[in-house]
Amino acid sequence: MVSISNNNQKQQLLSKIATNDGHGENSPYFDGWKAYANDPFHLTDNPNGVIQMGLAENQLCFDLIQEWVVNNPKASICTVEGAENFQDIAIFQDYHGLPEFRQAVAKFMEKVRGDKVTFDPDRIVMSGGATGAHEMLAFCLADPGDAFLVPTPYYPGFDRDLRWRTGVQLFPVVCESCNDFKVTKKALEEAYEKAQQSNIKIKGLLINNPSNPLGTLLDKDTLQDIVTFINSKNIHLVCDEIYAATVFDQPRFISVSEIVEEMIECNKDLIHIVYSLSKDLGFPGFRVGIVYSYNDTVVNIARKMSSFGLVSTQTQHLLASMLSDEVFIEKFIAESSERLGERQGMFTKGLAEVGISTLKSNAGLFFWMDLRRLLKEATFDGELELWRMIINEVKLNVSPGCSFHCSEPGWFRVCFANMDDETMRIALKRISYFVLQPKGLNNKAAVNKQCSRRKLQISLSFRRLDHEFMNSPAHSPMNSPLVRT
């Protein structure tokens, strides 16, 4: 009792924002990360640990990055070749950012979007990652209590990024598996009407394209419908396009920037893009987030707010040089796309061989896995029960759909680009054993016999996968025992 009282007294000394649950850490999404942190898998040091498949990180092309860094020592002020620029970069810089950095980012954004549009460097506002960019826009566009519509399922971090410190709400636009979770005009109108009935003021619509967690793209018709919808309601459109360069198959990515250039009647003051180098280049540690707004007032306000989360000038200097190397960028985008497609194809094919289906996708660092048939009951409690089994027994951190606010239980997000090839194979074997394990067999001998048969089937299946992998035209060059053999 004394301890509880002391805790209450300590909390009363702090702010409500600091002590509330707005961060969203009490979620299965983050619980999976904690399970991995407590027992991290390692090929030799901890081969029975939890494999991290809940982190959307692109590690498949670091060999290309490292090669460029070695060949361009002047890009860093911490090398002999680049030290002469140390003072100029280390001294005070204003919150506009280095001009060469903004120009290079604008060119990279154009390249990633197939050079279909142009971006004005003077509209680029920096932030501390996409997290900071989203919060900054929320502060600019909405007051506490206002809301943004968000199609489901959506990235769990949005609950933290847009809500925690701003007091803004997120209102779901319910999308369903019967049409592959597509965003429809009907769903948008129903969500908006429901919010109106609840006296919730909608200030904008947030979309994620390519989608996290689905790995799918919004087609041109859908994007036009979305822009028409927000114009008719006179609300903002925030387009998170941080996975724009992760597309590995047709159809191609279409940015909202293309749509607004074509739709003459569109009010551009309502359009805002969030971008980052965390996913497309694989640099989450650099904390490079971008707000690109077509609204002059938002650009000016956001630039002032960016003082709370700037990108270091050392990082800007390095990236300005890298992103300005057109030959390297062309090679990187093409190679990254090829490697992501190959890895996703190997993973989903391996799952299909044991009867696990996934939503068809062509982008992102993850796919949407359908385990509905494995649920003991078709409820979110049933989903969490299955998820705990996968975490604790199978030792895989995959993220349950309920943490993404999915409207239907039984879907899981699986990240595939944050591991080497051998770890991928082990993850596939683990989930295959789990799916194929005999159920309802009490006789131990029968169980062992069936397990042996299943293991043989799986072993033969993975031999075929290994053969296909080793004979494919391009595979991940990451340091993998599979590659070495």
Image (cartoon, grey):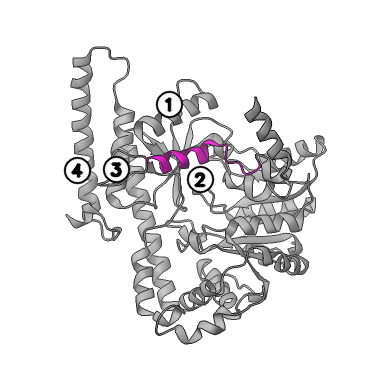
**Residue 265 appears anywhere in the view:** no
Which of the marked residues, 3 or 2, is nearer the chain's N terminus? 3
Q: Nearer the viewer, residue 235 or 54?
A: 54
Q: Which residue is mark 2?
A: 214
- Residue named by callout 3: 46
Verify CB contact (< 8 Å) between mark 1 and mark 2: no
Distance (Cα) linking label 3 and label 2: 31 Å
Amino acid identity at mark 1: Arg
Residue 258 screen position, x and y as percent? 62, 65
The residue depicted at 23 percent of the width and 41 percent of the height is: 462
Q: Which mark is residue 373?
A: 1
Coordinates of residue 55 in the picture (x, y in percent): 45, 48
**Residue 37: mark in rendering:** none
Q: Amino acid at mark 2?
A: Leu
Which residue is identified by label 4?
A: 463
**Label 3's element?**
loop
